[in-house]
Amino acid sequence: MKTDREGARAPGSFCMARTPAGIDVPPGLFLTSYTGLTDKPRNDTPFLRHLLVHPAHPADMGALLTSFANLVFELGRRWRFTLASGRFGTLARDMAYSTTIRRRRRTRRIDRAGNPAAIGRWLLFVAGLVALMVVVGGITRLTESGLSIAYWKPVSGILPPLDAEAWQRTFAAYQATPEYRLVNRGMTLDEFKSIFWWEYVHRLLGRLIGLAYGFPLLVLWMRRRIPSGLKPRLLLIFLLGGAQGLLGWFMVKSGLVHEPQVSHYRLAAHLLLAILIFSLLLWTALDLLEPRHGSRQRRWRAMAMVLLLLVVVQIGLGALVAGLKAGYAFNTWPKMGEHWLPPELFALKPFWRNFFDNAIMVQFLHRLNAMLVAGWCLLIAVSTWRFEAPPRTIAAALALLLLIVGQIWLGIVTLVEGVPVAIAAAHQAGAVLVLALTLYFLHMNRRTAHHL
């Protein structure tokens, strides 16, 4: 086949290859075949002789038919064979066209399989459900509803009591718990329903999160829509979600044995695991929705990591405050009673137990760490302004500082007002927002853009 000049092919033409016999054919028609006597491939056989003497392997038939259709179409277009205007020429064009369409569809399927925005939005939605569950869990704790359902039925427990007989059975199970005997003796069925519904909604929300995450994950996995680099992380989140359900029942079970109070260690573990799941969901979503962001400024990246550590410690201390009911120990600010340092800070022996089991020490540490979080965030905001960070980084740092100040104010109001449910729930929701914005600031200043 002639070209415009040596070494360049004419526009719109196929890149043809010349056989040893002088025939111009597409390179795809030089089939690789093997004889029974040698493993050496034979790539130098002219097309017709190769086709007649060495039949193609069945695995090569698709490529052979496609290349042959392209050859017929090219010959008809180039040399104006009557074949091109006849039935066989039309068939050849149709075969070539259908091959192109199949390739384009396959390419679109590959593009959809790597669609990061859709997966990122799905993960953001699930992260929002987890944040909502953290808030509902806090309300369940504040209303002392966590021990109202004295059994764990992952499947049949989806439905609440639907008739009077079912309500009586559920209430009878609660009457056998230490909480009813020691705290709520004489409670009526209507009063029981008021605490039952909070625990039921909390468990139902957990099941909905499992469905909202597990079912789309299964569908996307089976249809190969998830990038291979993302699969281990999504599978880890799924396993952590299952562990969270088991840990929740393990926590509730601790309050159904002797004392009507769950272990504050298990409560803290339950909350921190929820925070871990939320953080993984949010971070993965940010990786997918904002993959091109990254910063070379080690200063803000290191400072953001320290801030994240302080925020997680603060959330853990808040869980201990809730488990020990330390918010009722001192309802004054800024002093704790009449002292800056109460004498009961080190009342327990051995010494280390005061940091975990002493309600007064835990409240003191919660107050102190809040000031550390605010001071460190202020340092970050000043640093971004002083060293002329990008406007987006400065805005995120200032927003984070304002949010932390508001969170501290909510904490003070909660303490002074005697831990009202509405304000305390808002305080817990604020903690999740502070964590989310801290993760966003850290993600904005991560080392390099992450590609999944």
Image (cartoon, rainbow, N blue to C red):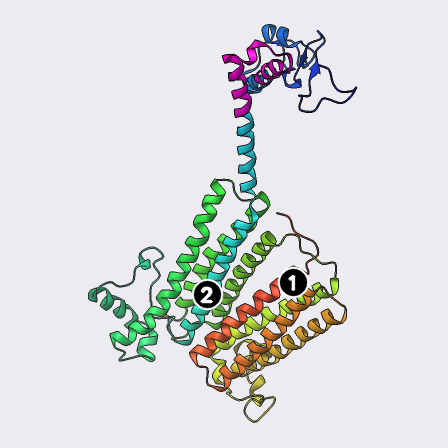
Q: Earlier in the sequence, mark 1 or mark 2?
A: 2
Identify residue type, mark 2: Leu
At mark 2, the secondary structure is helix
Point out residue 191 in the picture as x, y percentages from the top left corner: 29, 76
Q: Residue at x 46, y 53 (%)?
A: 213
Left or right of 243? Residue 53 is: right
Q: Residue 113 magenta-drawn? A: no
Q: CA distance from mark 1 to mark 2?
A: 23 Å
- For this view, does 42 lie left or right of residue 129? right
At x 54%, y 57%, the residue is: 281
Which residue matches tag 2?
Answer: 132
Provide residue 120's location: percent of width, then percent of height.
Answer: 54, 53
The residue carrying pointer 1 sits among few (fewer than 14), some (14 to 19) or many (20 or more) residues within 10 Å by Cα, namely many
Q: Is residue 114 above or below residue 2?
A: below
The residue under the point 58% across, 82% down is 364
- Give the magenta range: 69-98
Q: Which residue is denoted by mark 1 in the rendering?
A: 442
Q: Looking at the picture, does residue 289 appear above or below residue 350?
A: above
